[in-house]
């Protein structure tokens, strides 16, 4: 949370007054596909990314009256950077490779192994493929800033697009299954009236 949430907020607090004075500027958050989909074994990482994306989404609305100050949330998938090499195994779980015994054979074990570039147990195991080109990602970000953009989120990588489509399907399914329940929970005097949201 210190790195992924509080640090970007501190940077914004430092630079935003200058952008307000100039009436222009670009705030770019390098987030992750984990900012919209939480996978097994990545709860705290995703929590930090969900949180900072929410802050930037709100910020994008808060700066609308500042002139030409724009916010861009970049959501890269698996790119060929040194990110995977920085994963640290807690000392308490070195013998098992990063997870406690109770999680052996679960989705958590598979995610830990996949994140480390290791294959699973041979029975449906997976390997994280870092297929994204960092230079192409950088070029896309620069292009969005230089040429202007009408979107808040910039997804990068086919894996990120697939994950987002899966997330939209999950949200749509939940919405369809619970819409009638949601619509039935108003106080009686508000039934049929429009909501402020």
Image (cartoon, rainbow, N blue to C red):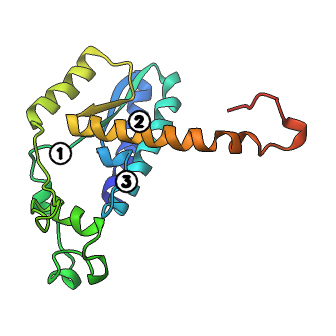
Residue 157 visible: no
Alpha carbon separation for disc pair 2 and 3: 30 Å
Residue position marked by numbered label 1 in the rendering: 78
Mark 1, secondary structure of its residue: loop
Residue name at image x 85 percent, y 36 percent: 190
Q: Is 68 rendered above or below residue 179?
A: above
* Residue at 67% across, 32% down: 197
Above or below for 43 versus 30: below
Q: Which residue is mark 3?
A: 38
Q: Residue at x 28, y 37 (%)?
A: 162
Query: Which of the pair 161/126 is nearer the observer?
Result: 126
- 169 vs 73, left or right, is right
Apparent side of residue 95 relative to residue 92 in the rendered image (left or right): left
Say which quadrant the N terminus sits in: bottom left
Q: Secondary structure at mark 3?
A: loop
Q: How far is disc 1 from disc 2 in space, using C-alphas?
A: 30 Å
Q: In the rendered structure, which disc, 1 or 2, sits on the residue that comes first in sequence?
A: 2
Query: Going by the image, does 28 lie left or right of 179?
Result: left
**Is there a contact, CB below 8 Å, between mark 1 and mark 2?**
no
Q: Position of residue 112 (x, y in %)?
A: 21, 65
| Figure quadrant of residue 114 | bottom left
Q: Name the residue nearer the viewer: 146 or 194.
A: 194
**Which label sits on residue 16?**
2
């Amino acid at each position: 949370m210190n790195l992924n949430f509080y640090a970007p907020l501190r940077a914004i607090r430092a630079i935003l007054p200058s952008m307000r004075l100039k009436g222009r500027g670009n705030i770019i958050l390098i987030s992750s596909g984990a900012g919209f989909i939480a996978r097994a074994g990545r709860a705290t990482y995703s929590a930090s990314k969900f949180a900072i994306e929410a802050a930037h989404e709100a910020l994008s609305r808060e700066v609308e009256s500042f002139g030409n100050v724009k916010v861009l949330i970049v959501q890269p998938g698996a790119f060929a950077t040194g990110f995977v090499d920085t994963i640290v195994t807690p000392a308490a779980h070195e013998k098992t490779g990063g997870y406690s015994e109770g999680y052996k054979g679960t989705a958590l074990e598979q995610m830990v192994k996949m994140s480390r570039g290791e294959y699973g147990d041979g029975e449906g195991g997976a390997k994280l493929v870092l297929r994204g080109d960092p230079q192409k990602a950088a070029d896309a970000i620069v292009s969005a800033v230089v040429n202007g953009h009408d979107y808040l989120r910039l997804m990068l990588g086919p894996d990120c697009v697939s994950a987002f489509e899966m997330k939209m399907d999950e949200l749509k399914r939940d919405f369809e299954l619970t819409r009638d329940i949601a619509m039935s929970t108003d106080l009686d005097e508000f039934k049929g009236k429009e909501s402020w949201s």
